[in-house]
Every structure is written in C-alpha cells, then in structure tokens.
Image (spheres, rainbow, N blue to C red):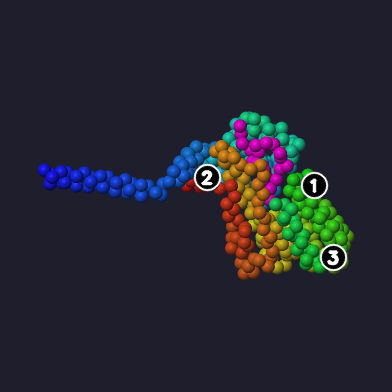
Amino acid sequence: MKKTRLISLFVILAVFGSLLAACGQKESSGAAASPAASAKATEAAKGAADLSGKKIALIMQFNTGTFSSQYVEGVKEQVEKLGGKVTVFVADTDLAKMASNLDAAINQKFDGILIDHGTAEALEAGVKKAVEKKIPVVSFDSILTVPGVTSLEQGDQKMAEATLEQLAKDAGGKGNIVKVWVAGFAPMERRQEAYQAFQKKYPDIKEVAAFGTAKDPALDTQTQMEAILKKYPNKGDITAVWAAWDEFAKGATRAIQQAGRTEIKVYGIDLSDEDLQLLQDPKSPWVASAAVDPKDIGRVQVRYLYQKLHGDQTPEKVVLDPVYVSREQLPKDKQVNTTQLSEFVKGWGGSQQGYTDWLKAAEKK
C-alpha cells in the first residue's frame, strides 16, 4: 500500500515538474516579445496599415533652381515610400496665387498639406481653415504661428555666420564686399540678422553694394554683378561676394568668371548638385557654402506630416542642422553630387529627424 502511494506521489510530482518546465519554456521563448515590444510592434503594424494611399499637397511659393527641384525630389521620395502621392502647386513667387493654391488643396480634400516658403499674411487664413477641417499642415521656411502647425527651418543664422566668419578670416578682417540678398522671405530675414551682427563685429569690412531679387535670381544677379564689376574695375576694389541664396551665388560666380576677376571670392548659402560643380571647379570664385541637404529637408517635412496623420504629437518648430562645405573638403580628381557628399563632409545627408519605428515599418510595407 505504501509502495503504491509512493509511486502515485512520484507520478504527480513528475507531471507537475513537466508543467513547470513547459511554462518556463513558454516564458523563455516569449522573452523577446515583452509587453513594451509587443505594443511597439502593434503600433508599427497599425501605422503601416492605416496611412497608405494618402494624397499630399505641396504648396510652393516658387520652384526655382536645382535646390528647389531636389527638395521636391525628397518630398516625393518620402511620400511614395509611405504609399502616398504628391501633387505640387507652384505660385511662381505670386503670394495671392499661393494662397489660392492653398484654398484649392483644402477644397479638393487632400489628406495633408506641405507648405514651402510664403508669408503669414498670405497663408494664415488658409492654414487656419485647413486645421479646422482636420487637415494636418507642416511648413518649411514660412513665418507661421498657427497652433497645431509644425514649422521647419534650416538654422539660417548658423549658415550665415559660418560663411561670413570664413569670409572675414580669408579677407584678414578688412576689405570691400558685395551682398546679394532679398527681403520678404523668412530664411532671408534670419540670415540678415547674422549679417547685421557681422557688420558690427568687422567694421573694416565695408559693404560697397547690395542687391537681389527673387525673380530670375541667377540671371538677374549675373546682370547686376556685371554692372558692379564695371563700376569697380580694379583688382582689390572688391574682396568678396556674400550670397544669401545659391541662386545668387551662381549668378555672381558666372559674372566674375566672365570678367576674369576670379580674385573675388564668393561665399554662398544652400547647395545642390549644380552648385557642387561650380564649387569644385578650381577656376571658380565660389569657394564655400553652408547648407542642409535639400532632399533631407523634403524627407523630414513629410515625416512630421505623417506623424500628424498618425495622431502623434509633433513639435511646433523643427530646426535642421546645417553643415559648412568648402572646396578644400572635396576631391580634386572626381566630380561629386549631393548623394555622395556625405563621404567627404561629416553631417551631410541621411538625416534621421522625424523618423519613428512605425514610420520605418510603414516604409517596409
């Protein structure tokens, strides 16, 4: 009897031990899928499933030059990776037309709106209307302070400071310079603040001419620069040109090259594939520029828009970090483009700003 009871007890203990082992194995095999990880995976799957097929409107004040075209490429690339489609509305610098384009995008019930440049006076009413209709808005280089709208900028003062400080260093803290700049644009106004501080810091660097227009900027700058070179015909009359936009830098560079006045150095802001060709040319007066990868700007702007579509909280302001690029950093034996520039300039391209795990999952889907 005792032997039977002992056998029964042994069997019960063995079965109980097996159950404990099975539970332990189950818990061990599920260790990688912690509650936090499971929630993360579920959220990623939800994001990937819900946001494909979105219609996105890009409302642009202008689409001039290769910088703008590469920015648009970045926007389209990121939207298409997320299964959406972009429609571009260009106003050709006409703010009334830009406001009309914004209204059209709202009336056509786009799922999200991206804004490139523009002013608060022209756009605020339309942006408020979009927000009221639950259409998310993310702007780039626009002075907009509408609650619920995320605004991107490039760190314009940093870019201006970097190029102006190098100009001052190369000039030995003295000389005559030409400024090419235009008022009425948010990034330009921020760059002008840095320029005014530069003038106070270096009183022996004199501004002998200042001009600029947003209409046909490269061609107009070339024409006006040609006239200034005739006014100051001698070597040493002009030390450098500071151009607050790459389109301005291109025009100034061409005028200086054609006049054979390459002792005059050009310092620019913004950078595109076309600009890099001029920057790498040893005969070009354009020696340096500060910029953010234009494709990155478009990509990051889209990511924040999709975060809004997903219901995420987004910051009111996002500042993109610029980098300084000089000819000395670039190879002499081959031409590079902005895609390859990260091989030579630390911090260029490949920005991870605005990325979330669910966005990456949505891209893979």
Q: Nearer the viewer, mark 3 or mark 1?
A: 3
At 83% from the left edge and 59% from the top edge, which residue is drawn? 201
Q: Is residue 179 visible?
A: no
What residue is disc 1 on? 183
Image quadrant of residue 127?
top right
Query: In the image, residue 121 lies at what x, y percent?
Result: 76, 36
Find the distance from the CA under tag 3 to the CA under tag 2: 51 Å
Disc 2: which residue: 359
Residue at image mark 3: 174
At which x and y percent is residue 365? 46, 44
Q: Earlier in the sequence, mark 3 or mark 1?
A: 3
Q: Majority secondary structure of the magenta segment?
A: loop
**Mark 2, secondary structure of its residue:** helix
For the residue labelled by badge 3, is the local secondary structure a helix, a strand or a loop? loop
Label annotation for residue 236: none
Instruction: Compute the Cα span from label 3 to label 1.
Output: 26 Å
Above or below, comparing residue 246 to residue 261 in the picture: above
Give the residue at x 65% y 37%: 148
Callout count: 3
* Magenta-highlighted residues: 134-154
The amino acid marked with disc number 1 is Ala
Instruction: Give the residue at x 56% y 44%.
Output: 79
Residue 58 is inside the magenta segment: no
Residue 134 in view (yes/no): yes
Above/below status of 179 relative to 96: below
Residue type, label 2: Leu
Select label 1 or label 2 by which is in front. Answer: 2
Residue 186 spot, x, y in % from top left: 74, 45
Residue farthest to the front? 2
